[in-house]
Amino acid sequence: MTNEAGGAGTDGVWQDTIAAADYALEEASRIQRGVQQNLKLMQEVRALREELRRAHAEIDRFRGMHARVVVGMRQVEEDHRAEVARLHAENEMLLVRHRVYKLLAEHYARSGLRFDPKVFAEHRDRVLEHVLFQRRRGIAVTQIPVAEIEFLLL
């Protein structure tokens, strides 16, 4: 019996050792799976960080492009405004000169004056000064009658 008991005791120790070893293997396997999962997650985190870094670089690139476009658009707007102002002033001056020549043509037609280029240039300058003066006073260029310039050309 003692032998059987001793054998039974030895069997129990072996069974406990096998169970402990089995448990240790299961734990080691579980730890290994956890480590593998952790490594996999770390690789995913690295990949996501790299993707985020690339996205930030692309955002910075687009910000730079946007800033250059905005600066360019502002420059175009300023150039456009300046060009429109220049064209407007040029148009105004052409309208004034047109009115001056029209007034002179009407005056010469009414008066029956001969055309002398030297005298005409003097008359043109006087009428231009008068038209510009009236315009500064707020009178529309088209509202200046021929009779108003006749006294200038006497």
Image (cartoon, helix red, strand yellow):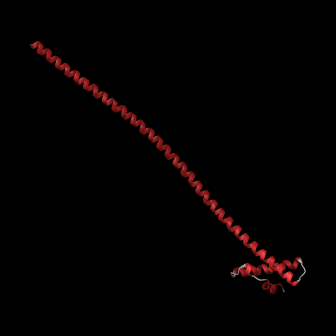
Say which residue appears at 30% left-offset and 27% top-offset. 28
Q: Is residue 109 left or right of residue 85?
A: right
Give percent across and percent down for residue 82: 67, 65
Identify the image quadrant of residue 120. bottom right
Task: From the viewer's side, name the closer residue of 49 and 142.
Answer: 142
**In the rendered view, would you say 17 is above or below 63?**
above
Tell me how many marks there are.
Answer: 0
Say which residue appears at 63% left-offset and 62% top-offset. 77
Q: Quadrant where the C terminus lies?
A: bottom right
**In the rendered view, would you say 80 is above or below 139?**
above
Q: Is residue 136 left or right of residue 125?
A: left
Task: From the viewer's side, name the closer residue of 95 and 89.
Answer: 95
Say which residue appears at 31% left-offset and 30% top-offset. 31
Give percent across and percent down for residue 134: 72, 82
Identify the image quadrant of residue 144. bottom right
Q: Is residue 106 left or right of residue 59?
A: right
**In the rendered view, would you say 84 is above or below 98?**
above
Give percent across and percent down for residue 145: 77, 83
Q: Quadrant where the N terminus lies?
A: top left
